[in-house]
Image: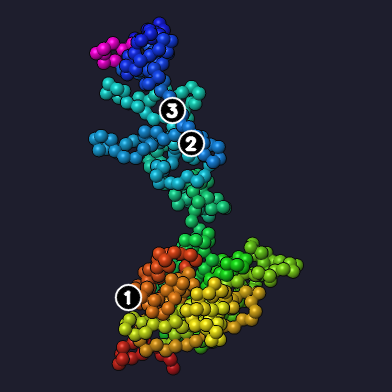
């Protein structure tokens, strides 16, 4: 038992706990904090220094964050690792969240402070665990159930669950209402694969959103032979709502091709019409605000209107057709790399104009800071729509790489692009598109990156044509 008498150290005495010299009148040891008013521990005593029933107060954290909120407290039960026997340490159930290492808390301070609940402790003589009384100044709330034992959360229809905690609803701003974690936007990274074409689009490492878009599809010509389509669009960042422009253009071009090719429209003519349809879709955005509402009385609606570039490829009837406006490109890469690769498009850009006029060679032109200033685009403020189309009849099998400048900036020449394309691209178009996006990201990822890989197969000689062009 403890004596109720106050014990004060005599001059020249030392702390009974750590032997630190004391001064007369001290009530606590300055070295170990021992309560000198308690009955001194006699040598050889196996009694604990502190009484079992005394309240234990976890030390308060010092400092605040940038919002003025006190720093969160980390408790022993919250720390990862194993005990001395190799078993897992207990996980604190007080927060009602996943372990701190699994979720980045960007939201309200309450989500972070929940981890500061007092721990359980074991008695020092080996008896069963007991819970220490909470300090009177900060009563402990009832512990939330362990989330690992909770039943799976079924979201209400039309709601999205947080990708981090898998429990909170995502609000309209893209943040979890439970843990505050920012959610990835749908267009930050997109992938799509059909049997005969695939595409990947990524935001890149420097841009805050993805302003590229793509569409891949397949249909059949009137004779039943296949027609495969890949469309890639790059929003003009200096224009308003470039992400809407690229999405509208890619969707409109793809829809028209899926309508006109089965009807028997010649593929090159169909590509021309698809670019015109894409242009009209982008033009219509200038008469709408971001919510799609009409702006009939806005005299400035065509100034800096939504804009994008476009490039597309069609494999149909033994022909390879490409079409474009702007500086997005299409490359031909043969399966047999002993054959030459080729760029199938010519940029609508300042650099291309300088080269075409004979004023600079290609190396000089593309080294100029004005090189990527485009001279053709889709949008209400474009000078004049001039769709470019070209048709090819390859004599060997290969793949068409349809891409934005976010990729070709890191593989500009046809030979460079061929080296970046995996050898099995025709058999694994999605994997190849992923590799090419990775090539751009490894190179710096300064822009959004979008690439479609479209295999083109030429039947072996004597095997008969796979296409009926009659």
Q: CA distance from mark 2 to mark 3?
A: 12 Å
The numbered disc on residue 71 is 2
Q: The residue tagged with tag 3: helix, strand or loop? A: loop
Residue assigned mark 3: 59
Q: CA distance from mark 1 to mark 3?
A: 62 Å
Percent across and percent down for residue 275 are 56, 80
Question: What is the magenta segment's predominant secondary structure?
Answer: loop
Report the front residue among 85 and 168: 85
Q: Residue at x 31, y 12 (%)?
A: 41
Percent across and percent down for residue 366 are 50, 76
Q: Residue at x 48, y 36 (%)?
A: 71
Q: Residue at x 41, y 35 (%)?
A: 74
Mark 1 or mark 2: name the one nearer the start of the chain. Answer: 2
Residue assigned mark 1: 423
Q: Quadrant of the C terminus?
A: bottom left
Mark 1 or mark 3: name the one nearer the start of the chain. Answer: 3
Q: Quadrant of the N terminus?
A: top left
Q: Are marks 2 and 3 in contact (CB under 8 Å)?
A: no
Q: Is residue 415 left or right of residue 180?
A: left
Percent across and percent down for residue 46 are 26, 16
Considering every residue shown, the one lying at the far top of the view is 5
Q: Residue at x 57, y 76 (%)?
A: 374
Is residue 462 shown to the viewer in this render?
yes
Residue extent of the magenta highlight: 40-47
């Amino acid at each position: 038992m403890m004596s109720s008498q106050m014990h004060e150290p005599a001059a020249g005495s030392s702390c009974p706990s750590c032997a630190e010299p004391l001064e007369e009148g001290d009530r606590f040891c300055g070295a170990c904090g021992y309560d000198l008013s308690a009955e001194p521990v006699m040598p050889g005593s196996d009694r604990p220094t502190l009484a079992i029933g005394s309240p234990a107060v976890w030390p308060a954290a010092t400092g605040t964050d940038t919002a003025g909120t006190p720093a969160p407290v980390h408790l022993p039960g919250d720390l990862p690792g194993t005990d001395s026997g190799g078993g897992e340490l207990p996980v604190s159930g007080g927060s009602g969240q996943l372990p701190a290492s699994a979720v980045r808390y960007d939201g309200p301070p309450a989500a972070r402070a929940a981890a500061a609940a007092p721990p359980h402790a074991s008695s020092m003589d080996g008896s069963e665990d007991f819970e220490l009384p909470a300090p009177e100044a900060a009563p402990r709330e009832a512990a939330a159930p362990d989330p690992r034992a909770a039943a799976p959360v079924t979201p209400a229809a039309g709601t999205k669950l947080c990708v981090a905690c898998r429990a909170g609803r995502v609000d309209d701003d893209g943040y979890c209402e439970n843990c505050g974690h920012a959610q990835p936007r749908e267009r930050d990274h997109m992938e799509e694969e059909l049997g005969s074409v695939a595409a990947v689009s990524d935001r890149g490492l420097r841009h805050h959103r993805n302003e590229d878009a793509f569409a891949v599809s397949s249909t059949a010509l009137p004779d039943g032979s296949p027609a495969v389509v890949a469309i890639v669009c790059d929003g003009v960042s200096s224009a308003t709502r470039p992400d809407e422009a690229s999405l509208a253009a890619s969707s409109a071009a793809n829809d028209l091709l899926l309508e006109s090719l089965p009807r028997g429209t010649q593929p090159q003519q169909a590509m021309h019409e698809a670019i015109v349809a894409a242009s009209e879709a982008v033009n219509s955005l200038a008469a709408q605000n971001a919510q799609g509402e009409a702006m009939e009385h806005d005299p400035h609606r065509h100034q800096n209107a939504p804009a994008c570039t476009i490039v597309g490829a069609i494999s149909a009837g033994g022909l390879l057709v490409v079409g474009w406006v702007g500086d997005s490109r299409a490359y031909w890469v043969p399966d047999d790399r002993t054959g030459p690769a080729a760029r199938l498009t010519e940029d609508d850009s300042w650099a291309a104009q300088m080269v075409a006029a004979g004023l600079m060679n290609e190396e000089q032109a593309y080294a100029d800071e004005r090189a990527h200033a485009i001279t053709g685009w889709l949008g209400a403020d474009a000078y004049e729509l001039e769709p470019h189309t070209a048709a090819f009849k390859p004599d060997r099998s290969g793949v068409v790489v349809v891409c934005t400048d976010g990729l070709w900036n890191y593989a500009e020449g046809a030979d460079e692009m061929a080296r970046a394309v995996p050898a099995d691209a025709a058999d694994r178009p999605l994997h190849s598109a992923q590799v090419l996006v990775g090539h751009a990201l490894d190179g710096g990822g300064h822009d959004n990156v979008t690439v479609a890989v479209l295999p083109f197969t030429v039947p072996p000689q004597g095997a008969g044509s796979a296409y009926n062009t009659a």
